[in-house]
DNA sequence: ATCACAATAT
DNA sequence: GATATTGTGA
C-alpha cells in the first residue's frame, strides 16, 4: 500500500486547486460557550436577556477585540447559581449551544471543504477540521451533511433518469427542484458534482468553466464596506439553476493531529448575532468576505 | 471510535 | 421548518 501512497501524493500535488483556494478556509465563530455565558446581544435587536442570574457585567457592545481562546473558564450555566455543584470549574461541558444557523456563506465553506476533500474523505470530522470554523461541532456537520447528501442524491437521480423508467422513489419525488425544500443548497453552486466514490470512470464534458469577466481571486478576505455596521444580511436568494455537471475528482488530504482540538487560532472580524425566538436562541455567523 | 442513515424531538 | 438528538447497524 505504500506505493499507492506515493501515487496519490503525486496526483495530489498536481490536482491541488491552488493554495489560494485552500487558504481562505478559515473562519471563526465565537465560542458558543462564551456566547451563551455572555448572552451576546444583537447590535440591532436588543433581545431581553433573562438569564437566571446575570453574574457578569452585561456585554456592552459586540464581543470585539476579544480573545476567547480555546480556553474558556466559566462556571456552568446551570446550577444554582453560585455554588457550582460540580465542585470544580469545569468548563461548560454539557452546555446547550444555540442552534447553528447555516447561512449561505457558511454552507459555501462547507461545500468548498467537501469539494476539496473529495467524497471519500468528506466525513464529518474531516470536514469540520477543514472548515476551521470555531465552535462548529462534528454533530453540526454530520447533521448538515446528511441533509446535503439527500439533496445531492435527488439531483443525481433526476438528471440521470434517462433510462426510461424511473423507479427510484427519490426520482419520483424529486421531479421538481424548485420547491423551497432546498433553498439553502441551491444558493450554493455545487463545484464538481459529487458523484459516487466508487466510479472513477465518467466521460463528462470538459471541466472547464468559462470564467466570467468578473472574478476576484484574492487570498485575503476583503472587508466589504468598512464602516457600515449593518451586518444583517440574512437574505434569501431565489436563485435557481445549477452549474452544469462537471467531472469529478478527489483528493486525499493531509492528516492533522487528531488529538489536538486545533481550532482556528485567528480571530477575524466576525459578527455574531444571537436572536431569541420563543426561547430559542440561534447563532448566526457572518463571514467577512463574500465570494 | 466514527460514520451513515432513519426516525424523532425541539 | 430547520437543526438537534437519538438509535441502530456497519
Image (spheres, coloured by chain):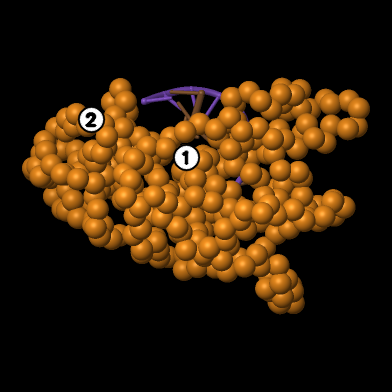
Chain colours: A orange, B purple, C brown
Q: Is residue A85 visible?
A: no
The answer as to whether the residues below labels 1 and 2 share one chain is: yes
User: Compared to A100, does A203 lie above or below?
Assistant: below
Percent coordinates x, y for residue A100 in the rendering = 41, 39
Dot 1, how many residues are within 10 Å of its Cα: few (below 14), some (14-19), or many (20+)? some
Percent coordinates x, y for residue A4 in the rendering = 74, 72
Q: Which mark is residue A47?
A: 2
In the structure shown, which secondary structural element does the residue marked by tag 2 occupy?
A: loop
Dot 2, how many residues are within 10 Å of its Cα: few (below 14), some (14-19), or many (20+)? some
Nearer the observer, A83 or A158? A158
Percent coordinates x, y for residue A10 in the rendering = 72, 75
Nearer the observer, A130 or A104? A104
In the rendered image, the quadrant that contains the N terminus of chain A is bottom right
Q: Splitting the image into 4 quarters, where does residue A170 fall? A: top right
Please identify the residue farthest to the right as the structure is shown. Answer: A164
Q: Is residue A104 left or right of residue A83?
A: right
Percent coordinates x, y for residue C4 in the rendering = 41, 36
Q: Tell which circle, 1 or 2, labels the residue nearer the N-terminal end.
A: 2
How far is disc 1 from disc 2 in space, using C-alphas? 21 Å
Nearer the observer, A170 or B3? A170
In the structure shown, which secondary structural element does the residue marked by tag 1 occupy?
A: loop
**Number of dots carrying numbers:** 2
Q: Tag 1, which chain?
A: A
Q: Is residue A285 visible?
A: yes
Q: What residue is pinned by disc 1? A: A103
Nearer the observer, A217 or A149? A217
Picture residue at 54% right of the left edge, 51% below the top: A291
Picture residue at 41% right of the left edge, 55% below the top: A223
Q: Is residue A162 left or right of residue A251?
A: right
> Are circles 1 and 2 on residues that touch, CB within 8 Å?
no
Picture residue at 47% right of the left edge, 40% below the top: A103
Amino acid at each position: 500500500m505504500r506505493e499507492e501512497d506515493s501515487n496519490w501524493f503525486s496526483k495530489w500535488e498536481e490536482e491541488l486547486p491552488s493554495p489560494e483556494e485552500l487558504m481562505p478556509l478559515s473562519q471563526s465563530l465565537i465560542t458558543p460557550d462564551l456566547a451563551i455565558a455572555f448572552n451576546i446581544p444583537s447590535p440591532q435587536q436588543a433581545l431581553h436577556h433573562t438569564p437566571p442570574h446575570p453574574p457578569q457585567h452585561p456585554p456592552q457592545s459586540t464581543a470585539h477585540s476579544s480573545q476567547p481562546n480555546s480556553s474558556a473558564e466559566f462556571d456552568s450555566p446551570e446550577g444554582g447559581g453560585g455554588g457550582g455543584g460540580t465542585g470544580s470549574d469545569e468548563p461548560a461541558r454539557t452546555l446547550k449551544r444555540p442552534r447553528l444557523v447555516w447561512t449561505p456563506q457558511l454552507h459555501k465553506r462547507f461545500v468548498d471543504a467537501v469539494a476539496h476533500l473529495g467524497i471519500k474523505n468528506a466525513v464529518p470530522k474531516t470536514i469540520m477540521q477543514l472548515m476551521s470554523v470555531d465552535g462548529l461541532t462534528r454533530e453540526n456537520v454530520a447533521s448538515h451533511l446528511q441533509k446535503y447528501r439527500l439533496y445531492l442524491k435527488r439531483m443525481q437521480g433526476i438528471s440521470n433518469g434517462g433510462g426510461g423508467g424511473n423507479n427510484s422513489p427519490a426520482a419520483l419525488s424529486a421531479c421538481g427542484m424548485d420547491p423551497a425544500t432546498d433553498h439553502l443548497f441551491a444558493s450554493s453552486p455545487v463545484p464538481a458534482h459529487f458523484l459516487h466514490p466508487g466510479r472513477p470512470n465518467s466521460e463528462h464534458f470538459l471541466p472547464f468553466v468559462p470564467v466570467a469577466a468578473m472574478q476576484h481571486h484574492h487570498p485575503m478576505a476583503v472587508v466589504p464596506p468598512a464602516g457600515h455596521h449593518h451586518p444583517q444580511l440574512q437574505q434569501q436568494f431565489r436563485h435557481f439553476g445549477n452549474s452544469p455537471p462537471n467531472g469529478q475528482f478527489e483528493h486525499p488530504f493531509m492528516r492533522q493531529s487528531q488529538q489536538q482540538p486545533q481550532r482556528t487560532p485567528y480571530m477575524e472580524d466576525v459578527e455574531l448575532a444571537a436572536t431569541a425566538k420563543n426561547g430559542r436562541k440561534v447563532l448566526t455567523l457572518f463571514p467577512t468576505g463574500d465570494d
